[in-house]
Amino acid sequence: MSNPILVAQSVHALYLLPKMANRHGLIAGATGTGKTVTLQTLAEGFSARGIPVFMADVKGDLAGMSQPGATNPKVLARAKELALADFEGAASPVVFWDVFGEQGHPVRATVSEMGPLLLGRLLDLNDTQAGVLNMVFRIADESGMLLLDLKDQRAMLQYVGDNAAEFKTQYGNVSAASVGAIQRNLLALETQGADKFFGEPALDLDDLIQTDSRGRGIVNILAAEKLMQQSPKVYATFLLWLLSELFERLPEIGDPDKPKLVFFFDEAHLLFADIEPAVQQKVEQMVRLIRSKGVGVYFVSQNPLDIPDIILGQLGNRVQHALRAFTPRDQKAVQAAAQTFRQNPKLNVETALTELAVGEALVSMLDENGTPQIVERAKVVPPRSQLGAITPEQRQQIIQSSVLFGHYEKAIDRESAFEKLQARAGEKVAAAGAPPAVPGASVPEAAKPSFFGEILGTAEGAFQPRIGPRGGRTDSLATSMVKSAVRAAGSQVGRQLVRGVLGGLLGGSSRRR
């Protein structure tokens, strides 16, 4: 069994057992109370025991894990206060990722992998629009059309909209308004930078579950500062997609001695804000079952009440930093948070929640039997790596020295729905025997109708019977005019009119009698 991870010190040491790490956890507390330091300490502990980690850096200060620390006076003072033996700086093996490909290896997914449920959430679709999107995915699958990037999705939407009558019987109505709304939302998504996320090469999950030459787990850090600023919903949906991919692809392994991967979900309140019932059910199912696949999920949020009760009940390992109680709503949140712990008769949990200093927390971990220990007030162990950001030069050096460098940097655009639909449209034009119209192109002289040809065509068309919208035949223009003229021939003016009209149409010349 792996060595336990020292998390905090109370009257005695508080440990997280690696065997219980896949039972999930929670790190909560108000802004500035020390959540990031706790997250960094836990990630270091997992990495040192050969457990890979995935975490999002929403503020830009987790990158310091790549550098040795223990130089900060406050960190050294805390280590001395807790009597930590042999406390010295140590870096963790880090791989940087970035949706925009600027501060890490580009991380991509295909539209097909994202699926209609998560893509619909990303596009903020209503039920009708979500139904149309599901239909488009189904038609693409059955037609052998790969949906890899957003231009594939847009082309497929246009194809289904243009041929709605063909699909109506088999799939149901396709509303032009719904197709237009989805297209507009896709365009808005592109302006937020999501077009850089969809495409190939897609992220290989095996690249997240790696160890270095010394057996330490790789710490995968997603540079999410820009993504959070531009589109928090894209950030939350991306992490949810990644978690669902792990759930679907990893095999069942039961309860291992240590997790295959620990997944930190920072700013977890973004995931559950206005979450659709179908998506919440999917998250609840994943959290309940993914532990048997060797994945531990740790939610990081300001308040434990940001997490739905069903999920909160699955989070056995907890580190709760201070909460503020400035308003009646805050006070209710403190009371509710206090009730989520196994009570300690020697500690007033509700009072302690508002009195905790920075770096202090209420800690409750699972014991070897999986039972939550009684909550204790403790001081969190400081990390051995650097606190805070690193320089751009240090980041680039780490990126370029990674074994993954060069694989994800070059985007691939292979044949998919967009290219196939373009080719199909070209074939239809060719079959019609006319080249596609090119704006501004000159018409060949031979293709232009002559003046006399136009006149003869007009005269010929005047004698052709007309076909109505329902197939009925009516008199030609010339026949109608002749009948009208005959009816008018009873008068002197009518007879003159008849001669004039017939003479003009038939080309006769008038003669004086």
Image (cartoon, rainbow, N blue to C red):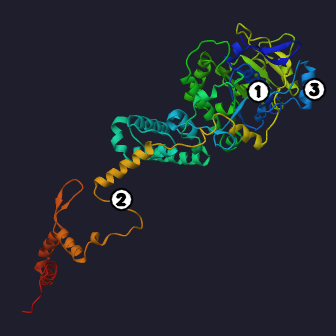
Quadrant assignment for the N terminus: top right
Q: Amino acid at mark 2?
A: Pro
How far apart are the two marked residues, 1 and 2, measured between alpha carbons? 60 Å
- Mark pair 3, 1: CA separation: 20 Å
User: Which residue in the structure is indicated by mark 2?
Assistant: 436
Decide if residue 396 is on the left or right side of residue 158.
Answer: right
Q: Earlier in the sequence, mark 1 or mark 2?
A: 1
Choose the circle earlier in sequence order: 2 or 3: 3
Q: Please indicate, yes or no, whether residue 233 appears anywhere in the rendered image.
A: no
List x then y, in percent, for residue 90.
81, 27
Amino acid under label 3?
Ala
Crowding at label 1, few (<14), some or many (≥20) Cα neighbours within 10 Å?
many
Disc 1 designates what residue? Answer: 39
Q: Which mark is residue 156?
A: none
- Asked if residue 106 shows in the view, the reply is yes
Q: Position of residue 458 (x, y in %)?
A: 21, 72
Q: Residues within 10 Å of mark 3 (few under 14, many from 20)?
A: few
Q: Secondary structure at mark 2?
A: loop
Q: Where the C terminus falls, by quadrant? A: bottom left
Callout 3–callout 1 Cβ contact below 8 Å: no
Indicate which disc, 3 or 1, sits on the residue closer to the N terminus: 1
Q: CA distance from mark 2 to mark 3?
A: 76 Å
Residue located 34% across and 35% down the image: 170
Q: Is residue 141 left or right of residue 228?
A: left
Residue 330 percent location from the top left of the image: 79, 29
Is 300 placed left or right of 82 in the picture? Answer: left
Where residue 218 sits in the image (x, y, percent)?
69, 27
Q: Does dot 1 land on a helix, a strand or a loop? A: helix
In this rendering, the answer to whether 419 lies above or below 219 is below
Q: Which residue is mark 3?
A: 77
Front-most of residues 439 and 250: 250
